[in-house]
Amino acid sequence: MRPDTGRVSIEDLRADGVLLEVNRRVLNPVGLALTLETMDGPLQIHRQGATVAHYDPDMPGLAEKAAAFRAIEATEHQSRFSARGYLIQPLPGDGPRVVQAFTADLNGIWAFIEQAAGDAAARVVHEPGETLAQAIASVLPSVVVAPLLGRLALVSSDGGATYEWRLQPEAKVDNDGSVWARCAYLITEIERLQFGGAADVGDAGGEIREYVQRAKGELYDHEVEEFAAARVSFEQMMGRTVSEESADAFAADLDEVHRTLERLYESAQPGMRVYRGDPDAREAFDEHRVRLKAAANSAVDRMDEYERLQAGELGDYEAADWQALDARLTAEIDEDARVCAEIEATLMQHIQRRDGRMRSLEVVRRALARGGVG
């Protein structure tokens, strides 16, 4: 289909799946069908009934046309939304477009929540009782809420008659070396690092949005705003038409967005606030280090003498039942030596068999080289 504005031929509309999708998405569901009187038109619309109008799934070229139309959507939707703020223009007085889920993939969603809740609990297990509620509230947004909202999607397997909440696979963005792909990769990674999920909170309500926004990552508020502006700039560039005259300006804009994202990506890495000398982050880190050391000491205290010896935590200057340790280690070493001897004997046996067969194979090969076939 032509990239510039202007009249589009019926052949292009057919080849790129536009006529197919007008029928499939708009007309067929209400019992109408768009047809061509001849290959070149004119276009006609017939009333067939909602239960009759349909496409034969085995029709030649159907999949190719559908794929071509999806490619157009991928290019044009973002450009239109960035420019207009909507895809389908709302009519005056129209309320919000709402899709209600008929059911949900509870098994997948609850498995995700259980794992995320376990991660959250592990982070606050050493908090004092009086601050436990605050500690849980501080980690739930980034560990549970934002990742879940980033993965949930309304999915319909019957063309829009019913919908179901499903947990989508975590988004993967290729980093193939081009500046364009690198920027897309950086945006996804910064969102993951900053908000704890693969995507932002989308159209979530104000209460949830405020809740999630409290779970900042390593970026400061002004850097979050800078990242949002860079992301908008990148999305707008996706819909720009570039000519020879504007190519240099486009490349400069893309390079500026790339530099901004690289800088923010570096600052979004775990521990960067501490690295940059943030006193609050340093205090929190020191508190965490004390709790970590206490947990490590507690784990060592729960070890017996043999476990401490094996972990390198028992010195020869300490009081211990050294006679019992000597007897146990001597017995274990003797057992290890016996097992090694059996393995070595088996290994030697197979080595000898292999060497004998290799000598036999050399005789066979020499015979074959002389033409000795019988």
Image: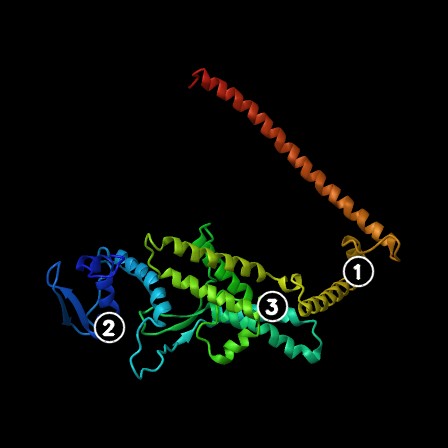
Q: What element carries label 3?
A: helix
Q: Are the two marked residues, 2 and 3, in contact with CB atoms closer than 8 angstroms?
A: no
Q: In this view, does 197 lie above or below 351?
A: below
**Residue bearing the label numbered 3:** 119
Q: What element carries label 1?
A: loop
| Displayed quadrant of residue 31 | bottom left
Give me the residue at 45% from left, 50% from top: 176
Between the C-alphas of marks 2 and 1, the distance is: 72 Å
Task: Please tell me which of labels 2 and 3 falls first in the chain.
Answer: 2
Viewer-nearest of labels 1 and 3?
Answer: 3
- Residue lying farthest to the top in this orientation: 370
Residue 140 vertical placement versus 323 (above, below): below
The circle drawn on residue 40 is: none
In this rendering, does residue 337 appear at all?
Answer: yes
Answer whether labels 1 and 3 touch (C-beta < 8 Å).
no
Q: From the viewer's side, name the closer residue of 21 and 228.
A: 228
Most extreme residue toward the front is 245
Distance from the alpha carbon under mark 1 to that under mark 3: 29 Å
**Amino acid bearing label 3:** Asp
Q: Residue at x 31, y 73 (%)?
A: 88
